[in-house]
Image (cartoon, rainbow, N blue to C red):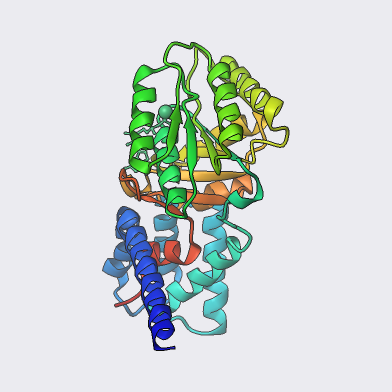
Amino acid sequence: MRFSKKKSSNKKEETLKVSKQKEEKFNIGFELSRNRLKEGLLSLFGKEIKINKNFLEQIEAFLYQSDFGITVTESLLRKIEEASRKLPITNYQDLSNILREEFRERFARNNPEIPIDSHKPFVLLVVGVNGSGKTTTLGKLAYFFAQQGKKSLIIAGDTYRAAAIEQLELWAQRAGADFIKNPDAKNPSGIIYEGVQKGLHDQTDLLLIDTAGRLHNKANLMEELRKIVRVIQKLIPDAPHESLLILDGTVGQNGIVQAREFGKILPLTGLVVTKLDGTAKGGVLTAIHEKMGLPVKFVGLGEKIDDLLPFDVDLYVDSLFGKMD
Ligand SMILES: Nc1nc2c(ncn2[C@@H]2O[C@H](COP(=O)(O)OP(=O)(O)O)[C@@H](O)[C@H]2O)c(=O)[nH]1
Ligand SMILES: [Mg+2]
């Protein structure tokens, strides 16, 4: 009895530790964005605030600069005005509470979970333009799922750059994932077919497939992606089970254009926004989520293997607008 009690309290402590770590990662990752939003507002107005024209104009400017986009910015401003008519907003804490409510509503249906137990192997494909963070994200994902006791096989589907294959192999080693490559092949179909066969044979939990982001031209790239999907479906007709678009958060809302292009080729199931640690435009993921209606599954908050976190709206709002100390 005493033993089991101890065990459960250890478990509680462990859960608390993990959530504290997540909070810290979000806080560090969104520091540049928070400097603009929370610190920007506090330095202008202090902790005591008054909702008036000047305040609304300033917050509007900050929201635009953070790349929330027109629709989200206007809706946030409307919420602040409405709320302040009901009950006076007199301090920064009230304001951040209102914003938190608004973001919770916005992301209410944003389920970041990836149902990896629904298929075996579960096939996950990453797509996106060159440099967006596909290869890095795939390595981080293998590590993320390894923490849950799942074994991944990573398939090097970007066969155009030798360096890309090496980079991916290194990530696979770090994550303890299996890896399959064919450095001599020009087109990825062969290695992807082989990889899917291997995954089926080994009863791997997850197949993580990397793809190229740049070919001679856009039409070629898109044609190749179509082909990749066909090759996968020859062996697993309902795969890929998850097709994630990887977007570089520092690029801002141009990501929306990319999302539309890729969405024409294959049904995207979610977004991963990377490099958010390198930008003050942390609002961009809200803008893209709003425009595309796609769930934000993960956020990339650094270059280390554990710097990829499932999107969490509360941590996001707190790390942008901050809790008051
Ligand atoms: N700071 C930071 N850098 C990242 C993140 N994700 C990827 N990168 C970097 O972005 C660069 C391009 O990433 P890569 O995975 O090769 O992109 P790919 O061409 O889409 O495969 C690399 O230098 C990565 O280290 C992130 O979340 N934060
Ligand atoms: Mg790559």
- Quadrant location, the N terminus: bottom left
Quadrant position of ligand 1: top left
Residue 321 locus on image (x, y percent): 39, 66
Residue 226 locus on image (x, y percent): 65, 23
Residue at 60 percent across and 31 percent down: it is 262
Residue at far left of view: 43
Position above or below: 89 against 100: below
Front residue of this view, candidates 240 and 40: 240
Residue 304 locus on image (x, y percent): 30, 45
Residue at 40 percent across and 30 percent down: it is 131
Front residue of this view, candidates 4 and 255: 4
Front residue of this view, candidates 230 and 319: 230
Position above or below: 209 against 325: above
User: Which quarter of the picture shows residue 177?
Assistant: top left
User: Which quarter of the picture shows residue 201?
Assistant: top right
Q: Is residue 51 visible?
A: no
Residue at 42 percent across and 85 percent down: it is 5
Residue at 60 percent across and 16 percent down: it is 219
Residue at far right of view: 237
- Quadrant location, the C terminus: bottom left
Q: In this view, does 36 lie to the left or right of 199?
A: left
Front residue of this view, candidates 146 and 44: 146
Question: How many numbered circles are shown?
Answer: 0
Residue 312 locus on image (x, y percent): 48, 61
Q: Can residue 269 be seen in this view?
A: yes
Q: In this view, does 40 lie to the left or right of 184?
A: left
